[in-house]
């Protein structure tokens, strides 16, 4: 084959690839998906952990979708039965008893109901919501706008990292440097990539914890807080202080453990408290950050230094929903998909929580988006309950909520992620230019060889 023909064909292939990529809307930086197993998926490049992966969407073996019915309060006292042995207590450890059920229900009379709760005269809730329990509330006033089984008890998965983040942000010096250990690297489930000997500030560990749900980061943070048991105790003390009576953490990371419990109501309470911390609001709004590498392991022959790498926020609502503030994803086999996020529109900020959801018929972040749209469309005085205020019956928050920082362009994220559009435009312009350059190069080489 002639060299000119090779150049022409190469140029055509590159042009086609560039066009397809542009039309597909490929993002400038690849981001993890929301329904990536956030507490049980293996680290990038590692083999899947048996029994801890989501079923393929559209699998021919999955039954038709139906929204779970909770009218009979099946989870009034405790989460559904586990499907594996992850919640079996260690030898010699007692089996936790169900948490007491407050009466009357915290948040108002209707919060004690278990079915779908909407304000009088409100339209029907969106279709295609697979979450067994969910809630939409006003982040600033505390008004609960709509809910389903708000105090039903389910498992939090990685959304419990919101509680860990609150404890850490109020206890640790963010500039302190932590040296990674083999115990961090060996932790079960999703890992950001901490390596033995790596040096990480607590700010970087919190980025890894909140943005990409690193269980290794949770372990490194918990070690500084006195170990797993001491950290879990602090998280549970926090829940009691906030009147999150359905919540009991069993692990710092959200991996399933004996007695693990949370409700859609409590998850909103924890998230609202976290949003009073400016750095938390900043971290959930951060799309990408650089994470340090770690040195070669002398115990591994031929091992070399591991360079740093970028990490991305795994909350897809942040990139695809106008006004998204940020949030936290979660998944385990027992918990299924869990999610908490917030968004702002016309001066109102709403929080949405999902528990025991599935990726069918639409993904959790898409379910959250529909519920947010529903909440934003309700009357400004609509409510079916309220979030608790410590020491007061007032609806207004006692602590001002933090606002996420603006992006580099000064926007607050009221539009769909601009980098995606920029990548498409750059590809459409750069692709043809690259074709021209390759054609000129091929022509020049051909002339030389004549």
Image (tube, helix red, strand yellow):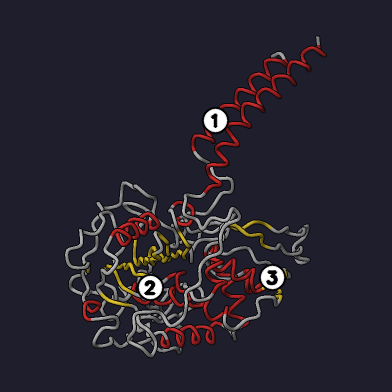
**Which labelled disc corresponds to residue 200?**
3
| Residue tagged 1 | 19
Q: In the image, which is nearer the foreground, mark 1 or mark 2?
A: 1
Residue 61 x/y as whole percent = 30, 50
Residue drawn at (42%, 61%), measured in percent from left and top? 344
Badge 2, how many Cα within 10 Å: few under 14, some, many 20+?
Answer: many
Q: Is residue 46 visible?
A: no
> Mark 2 and mark 3 in contact (Cβ < 8 Å)?
no
Residue 163 vs residue 13, the one in the foreground:
163
Q: Which quadrant holds residue 114?
A: bottom left
> Mark 3 and mark 1 in contact (Cβ < 8 Å)?
no
Q: In the image, which is nearer the foreground, mark 3 or mark 2?
A: 3
**Which labelled disc corresponds to residue 155?**
2
Residue 173 x/y as whole percent = 66, 80
Badge 1, how many Cα within 10 Å: few under 14, some, many 20+?
Answer: some
Q: In the image, which is nearer the foreground, mark 1 or mark 3?
A: 1
Give the secondary structure at mark 3. strand
Q: Which quadrant holds residue 181?
A: bottom right
Give the secondary structure at mark 1. helix
Q: Is residue 299 above or below residue 439?
A: below
Q: Quarter holding the N terminus?
A: top right
First of labels 3, 2 by sequence position: 2
Position of residue 379 in the picture relative to residue 9 (left or right): left
Residue 422 vs residue 212, the one in the foreground:
422
């Amino acid at each position: 084959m002639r060299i000119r023909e090779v150049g022409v064909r190469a140029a055509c292939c590159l042009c086609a690839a560039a066009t397809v990529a542009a039309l597909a809307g490929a993002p400038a930086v690849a981001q993890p998906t929301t329904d990536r197993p956030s507490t049980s998926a293996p680290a990038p490049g590692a083999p899947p952990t048996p029994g801890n992966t989501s079923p393929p969407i559209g699998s021919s073996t999955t039954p038709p979708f139906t929204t779970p019915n909770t009218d009979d309060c099946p989870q009034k006292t405790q989460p559904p039965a586990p499907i594996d042995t992850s919640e079996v207590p260690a030898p010699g450890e007692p089996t936790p008893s169900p948490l007491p059920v407050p009466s009357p229900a915290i948040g108002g009379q209707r919060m004690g109901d278990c079915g779908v709760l909407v304000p009088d005269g409100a339209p029907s809730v969106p279709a295609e919501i697979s979450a067994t329990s969910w809630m939409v509330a006003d982040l600033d006033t505390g008004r609960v706008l709509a809910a389903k089984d708000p105090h039903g008890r389910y498992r939090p998965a990685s959304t419990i990292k919101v509680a860990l983040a609150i404890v850490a942000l109020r206890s640790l010096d963010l500039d302190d440097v932590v040296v990674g250990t083999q115990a961090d690297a060996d932790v079960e489930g999703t890992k950001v990539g901490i390596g033995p000997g790596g040096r990480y500030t607590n700010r970087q560990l919190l980025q890894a914890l909140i943005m990409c749900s690193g269980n290794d980061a949770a372990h490194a943070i918990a070690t500084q807080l006195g170990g797993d048991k001491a950290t879990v105790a602090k998280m549970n003390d926090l829940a009691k202080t906030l009147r999150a009576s359905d919540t009991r953490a069993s692990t710092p990371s959200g991996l399933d453990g004996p007695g693990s419990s949370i409700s859609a109501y409590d998850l909103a309470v924890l998230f609202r408290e976290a949003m009073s911390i400016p750095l938390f609001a900043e971290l959930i709004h951060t799309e990408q950050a650089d994470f340090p590498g770690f040195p070669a392991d002398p115990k591994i022959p031929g091992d070399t230094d591991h360079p740093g790498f970028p990490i991305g926020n795994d909350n897809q609502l942040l990139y695809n929903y106008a006004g998204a503030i940020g949030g936290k994803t979660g998944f385990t086999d027992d918990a299924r998909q869990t999610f908490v996020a917030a968004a702002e529109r016309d001066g109102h900020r709403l929080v949405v929580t999902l528990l025991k959801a599935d990726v069918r018929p639409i993904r959790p972040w898409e379910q959250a988006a529909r519920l947010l749209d529903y909440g934003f469309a309700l009357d400004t005085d609509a409510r079916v309950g309220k979030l608790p205020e410590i020491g007061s019956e007032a609806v207004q928050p006692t602590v001002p909520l933090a606002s996420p920082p603006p992006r580099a362009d000064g926007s607050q994220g009221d539009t769909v992620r601009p980098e995606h559009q920029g990548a498409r435009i750059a590809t459409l312009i750069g692709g043809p230019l690259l074709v021209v350059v390759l054609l000129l190069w091929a022509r020049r080489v051909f002339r030389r060889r004549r």
